[in-house]
Amino acid sequence: MDSSDPAAWQTVWNFFRNGGWFMVPILACSVVAVAVVAYKIMTLAKSLIIPESLVVEVEQIEEHLEKGSLNGLQDQFTAGETSLARLCKVALHNAGRTQGEVQEAVQSAAREEIVKMNTGMPTLEVVITIAPLLGLLGTASGLVIVFANVGQSADHASVGQGIAMALNTTVAGLAVAVPTVIAHSHFNRKIELMAARLEVLMGKVTSACHQHVFFKNR
């Protein structure tokens, strides 16, 4: 849209004005959805969850174990601020325990990381639910205005206002909900993939911790 075109802005303004006050909560839903989507894009970056450089080190953790360089790798885990680094740090911190106890500690920490990754997802679900409902409520209100003014002495201006409210709120509610559904599905799938990747990597770390303690006690 050309910001210098007053006719275009007038069209947008008329669209929202004709939708009535139901457009206000629908617009608020759109602002919340955009804010959450921007937040998820920033916080679900792969570099903040499973950075490739650290993944390579974890994939070679058995080689580090054989070379006796596990302590150097532990320093990377301690200094890291990613989900993978924090989970690896938990695993190495509990390396003196049984493999079952290490797995339990890692799983507890992993659940916390998954909760962090899901931050904002319930908000998107709320927007997906209420935006179409607000549009439907506006539609019903518009139809009430239409039928209240239908008759021999029909007020054509009120009828037109009711029709505009019914159509505009429906369009606005769906226009907010549909992109939000797409974004929610994308983020949900991304979280599932990263959670599965973390599970595989932590299996390697847990096994390496058990071997490390076994060889130290021989």
Image: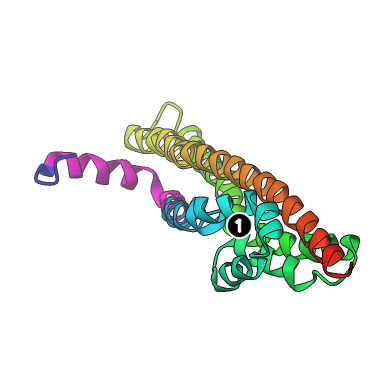
**Image point 63% across, 54% down: which residue?**
58
Q: Secondary structure at mark 1?
A: helix
Q: How many numbered callouts?
A: 1
| Location of the C terminus (image quadrant) | bottom right
Q: Is residue 146 left or right of residue 102?
A: left
Q: Using residue 208 as the reference point, say whether residue 119 is left or right of it.
A: left
Tell me which colouring the rendered structure shows. rainbow
Residue assigned mark 1: 117
Q: Is residue 133 visible?
A: no
Residue under the image location 53 percent in, 45 percent down: 131
**Residue 167 occupies which quadrant of the picture?**
top left
At label 1, the amino acid type is Met
Q: Is residue 162 above or below residue 97?
A: above
Instruction: Give coordinates of residue 156: x percent, y percent.
Output: 34, 32
Say whether residue 66 is magenta: no
Q: Main secondary structure of the magenta part?
A: helix
Which of the 4 quarters of the picture holds residue 202?
bottom right
Q: Nearer the viewer, residue 85 or 135?
A: 85
- Is residue 25 a member of the stretch shown in magenta? yes
The residue at the point 70 percent across, 53 percent down is 62
Q: Over which residues does the magenta segment extend?
A: 7-27
Closest to the observer, 210 or 112: 210
* Residue 141 point in image, percent of width and height: 51, 42
| Image side of residue 111 versus residue 20, left or right | right
> Does residue 15 show up?
yes
Residue 157 location in percent, x, y?
A: 32, 36
Q: Quadrant of the N terminus?
A: top left
Residue 173 placement, left or right of 218:
left
Measuring from the top left, give residue 12's x and y in whole percent: 26, 42
Q: Is residue 122 above or below residue 184?
A: below
Q: Few, some or many C-alpha atoms within 10 Å of disc 1 (few <14, some 14-19, many ≥20)?
A: many
